[in-house]
């Protein structure tokens, strides 16, 4: 079960999450000389990334990776890389950012990224994650079987008119030294309650974090308060 940090609202969520990320990154650099961080997309982490970019982060010793990506070009408005560049990378002297090649297609992009992390990442120091209002996390969507795929990086066809995706697999996510999960808003309330209750992971892929050895959930009152 993840440690739960309850915050009042969106601003405090971003602040607390950025402080947690910074502490994990600083510790990794102090212990191993480098911090390997996997970033999630979506609307929730953007403000936390902007706060993280302020205040003297040792970006020279950070290696930035991605939890998932849509199969779109890197400058597309729905690209997770484009969002991270806007919210984080443009404010830092980033020299080591390893994007997922969504424009190559899900299968080819997943294979390429699996080969990349096999070379570059013995283990992620930090994974920044979220939970969708349907219970998905990363791009492991309900009913697709993606959360059961043993591959380190998986190609996902979410359906419902959504783009194909590339996503870190369950085992890769759970191998991280620390996972910080950000959840905000009443729309996430039902999915979060399900994610914190044991059951079928394919129905609610975010349940995978129940098996995480080191995970912290930062959630606001709206997401945590029962109906």
Image (tube, rainbow, N blue to C red):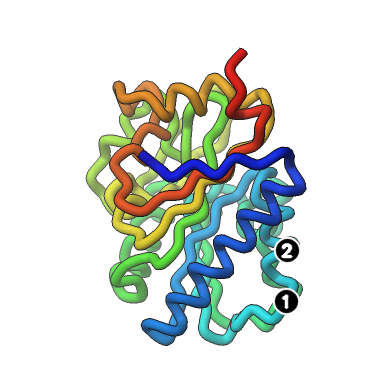
Residue 68, disc: none
Q: Does residue 21 appear in this view?
A: yes
| Residue at the far top in the pictured view | 227
| Above/below status of 58 relative to 171 | below
Q: State if disc 2 and disc 1 touch (CB < 8 Å).
A: yes
Above or below, comparing residue 149 to residue 227 in the picture: below
**Nearest to the observer: residue 186 or residue 159:** 186
| Residue at horizontal 61 percent and vertical 55 percent from the top | 17
Q: Position of residue 120 (x, y in %)?
A: 36, 75
Determine which of the numbered discs, if any, sits on residue 51 in the image: 2
The answer to which of 182 and 124 lies nearer the viewer is: 182
Does 99 appear above or below 119? Answer: above
Q: Residue at x 51, y 72 (%)?
A: 25
In the picture, the quarter occupied by the C terminus is top right
| Residue found 34% across the figure and 57% down from its top | 111
**Which residue is located at x 48 percent, y 27 percent?**
135
Left or right of residue 185, residue 3 in this image: left
Circle 2 SS class = helix
Residue 194 relative to residue 12: left or right: left
- Looking at the figure, which quarter contains the N terminus? top left
Estimate the x, y position of residue 80 in percent, counting from the top left: 62, 53
Front-most of residues 201 and 105: 201
Q: Visible in this render: residue 153?
A: no
Q: Element under label 1?
A: loop
Q: Position of residue 190 (x, y in %)?
A: 54, 19
Estimate how packed mark 2 is, as few (under 14), some (14 to 19) or many (20 or more) residues with alpha carbons within 10 Å.
some
> What residue sits right under mark 1 in the picture?
55
Residue 47, given in percent of the width and then of the height, sits at 73, 54
């Amino acid at each position: 079960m993840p440690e739960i940090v309850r915050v009042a609202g969106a601003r405090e969520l971003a602040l607390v999450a950025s402080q947690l990320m910074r502490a994990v990154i600083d510790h990794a650099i102090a212990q191993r000389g480098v911090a390997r961080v996997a970033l999630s997309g979506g609307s929730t982490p953007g403000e936390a990334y902007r706060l993280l970019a302020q205040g003297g982060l040792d970006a020279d010793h950070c290696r930035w990776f991605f939890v998932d990506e849509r199969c779109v070009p890197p400058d597309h408005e729905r690209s997770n890389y484009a969002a991270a560049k806007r919210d984080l990378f443009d404010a830092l002297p980033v020299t080591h950012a390893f994007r997922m090649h969504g424009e190559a297609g899900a299968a080819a992009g997943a294979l390429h990224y699996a080969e990349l992390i096999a070379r570059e990442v013995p283990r992620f120091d930090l994974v920044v994650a979220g939970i969708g209002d349907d219970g998905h996390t990363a791009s492991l969507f309900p009913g697709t079987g993606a959360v059961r795929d043993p591959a380190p990086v998986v190609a996902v066809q979410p359906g419902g008119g959504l783009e194909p995706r590339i996503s870190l697999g369950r085992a890769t996510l759970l191998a991280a030294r620390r996972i910080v999960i950000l959840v905000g808003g009443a729309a996430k309330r039902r999915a979060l309650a399900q994610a914190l209750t044991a059951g079928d992971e394919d129905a609610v892929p975010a349940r995978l974090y129940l098996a995480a050895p080191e995970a912290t959930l930062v959630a606001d009152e709206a997401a945590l308060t029962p109906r």
